[in-house]
Image (cartoon, grey):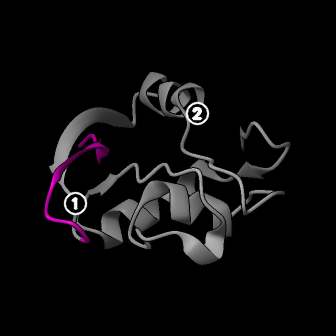
Amino acid sequence: MIKMRDGGAFDQHALIACFREHGGSMVLGAVKASLAEHKKPRSLDYWLRLNGARIPDQMQAEASLVAQLVESGNFEAVVLKCPETGRNCKGLQLRT
């Protein structure tokens, strides 16, 4: 289990399965907005809010959590085109 800043936790294997469903990568999509106002439903931040966050209206894809994921060896930091905005954004890619 990966611990989150708000006291929640998630199973890294479930996250890996989600990444595979999304083609192996996801934008971070970290925003300081409520879950209802979140504009990037295909982002890591949105997934984290629905899958382990104790406070889903709080940003979850923060730097320390992203660093934990990269340090696990399963992910690498990349720049991706956001599926919602078309702009380049920070993201993670599943390592093969």
* Amino acid identity at mark 2: Leu
Image point (30%, 32%), residue name: 76
Choose between 85 and 11: the one closer to the eye: 85
Quarter of the image containing the N terminus?
A: top right
Q: Distance of mark 2 from mark 1, alpha carbons?
A: 20 Å
Percent coordinates x, y for residue 86 in the rendering:
14, 64
The image quadrant of residue 92 is top left
Instruction: State which quarter of the image contains the C terminus.
Output: top left
Q: Label 2: which residue?
A: 65
Residue 66, can we see it? yes
Q: Which residues are magenta?
A: 84-96
* Kind of element beneath mark 2: helix
Observer-nearest of 86 and 16? 86
Q: Earlier in the sequence, mark 2 or mark 1?
A: 2
Q: In the figure, 42 relative to 95: above or below?
A: below
Residue at the spot x=56%, y=36% of the render?
62
Instruction: Name the amino acid, label 1.
Output: Cys
Residue 88 % position (x, y): 15, 48
Judging by the rendered image, the residue that carries numbered circle 1 is 82
